[in-house]
Image (spheres, grey):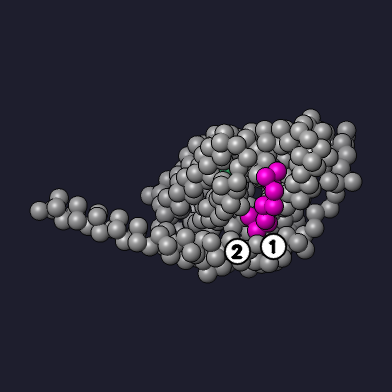
Amino acid sequence: MYTTELQNQAGKPKAQVASTEDPALLEAFEARVAADEFIEPKDWMPEAYRRTLVRQISQHAHSEIVGMLPEGNWISRAPTLRRKAVLLAKVQDEGGHGLYLYAAAETLGTSRDEMVEALHSGKAKYSTIFNYPTLTWADIGAIGWLVDGAAIMNQVPLQRTSYGPYARAMVRVCKEESFHQRQGYEIMMAMASGTPEQKRMAQDALNRWWWPSLMMFGPPDENSPNTAQSMRWRIKRDTNDELRQKFVDVTVPQAEAIGLTVPDPDLKWNEAKGGHDFGEIDWEEFYAVVRGEGPVAKERMKARIDAWNDGAWVREAALAHAAKRNARAAA
Ligand SMILES: [Fe+2]
Ligand SMILES: [Fe+2]
């Protein structure tokens, strides 16, 4: 889902380190990127480009699989068989997104084990949004509508990101995210036109998920020191604030269409800019969640670590099977 860079992001610019790389190679690389060519795994690339990609793609992969937890939690409690089947498919898609992305990051020379270890030790980040709890069924609607909706805003431009394996993974991911967004909106639509209690639940879910969804785009551009370099290398194609604005402009009319109210008293259409003005985001809350202080952050990490440990025997069995097959083939 969720690709906004969260590390090195507390507003402090990184020290510029003079590159010791071959200027001719660097120049050729930059020219290819500027010409919108894809960079492929075997191509020469600056170390900082490789590092930025590993960080961004692995963070994205972690977000996909941690993102399975808040919704997975509701599969056994979905209100109908149809809702259960749809949610099951959606959560399974997220697991698949994680796999494509880990595979894309591996092409940059980092192993799956290293990435998983970085997640479990807290060194690697994942999207702040998954550290909020899912309290009612309406939250499943709000997540699909808002969280997957925000993910699409982020990911559609990434289909043209400069690193080939990442861009290609995004093509399929975006198709699936679009289904996720619709299934969430459809849940909200049903609840918003249901009983007064159902409508109240839908509104309550929107109230709780709106602001964390806006935070998914990351800190404001002036506090996002990596943005300029990432834009130059075409890893990113739009800034955090541009994407956030797009999301607000698309989502506000969707809320109005189903009779829900966006919980922002400062929200209003600005004719001159052709977009909505909206209220101040609570950046203190955002940075606290980035630091690992989100409401259910500990629970999420425990679930991931337990799943990794409980699945150890599957990995061992798969390796033993592959070794046997290779030995047989060699004989
Ligand atoms: Fe996803
Ligand atoms: Fe999704």
Counting the numbered discs, the total is: 2
Left or right of 185 in this view: 168: left
Numbered disc 1: secondary structure: loop
Residue 10's spot in the image, x, y percent?
A: 70, 65
> Is 176 one of the magenta-colored residues?
no
191 and 169: which one is in front?
Answer: 191
| Residue 299 numbered mark, or none | 2
**Whether residue 306 is visible:** yes
In the image, the segment drawn in magenta is: 130-139
168 and 314: which one is in front?
Answer: 314
Numbered disc 2: secondary structure: helix
**Disc 1 within 8 angstroms of ligand 2 (CB):** no
Locate residue 311: give its quadrant. bottom left
Residue beneath the point at 43% across and 65% down? 309
Residue beneath the point at 81% across and 37% down? 196
**Whether residue 32 is visible:** no
Residue beneath the point at 76% across and 33% down? 194
Outermost residue toward the left? 331
According to the image, label 1 marks what residue? 295
Residue 63's spot in the image, x, y percent?
A: 57, 53
Q: For the residue marked with disc 2, what is the amino acid? A: Glu
191 and 315: which one is in front?
Answer: 191
Q: For the residue marked with disc 1, what is the amino acid? A: Pro
| Residue 74 numbered mark, or none | none
Locate residue 202: give its quadrant. top right
Residue 184's spot in the image, x, y percent?
A: 65, 38
Residue 248's spot in the image, x, y percent?
A: 76, 40
Residue 135, above or below 141: below
Label 1 packing within 10 angstroms: few (<14), some (14-19), many (20+): few
Residue beneath the point at 73% across and 60% down? 286
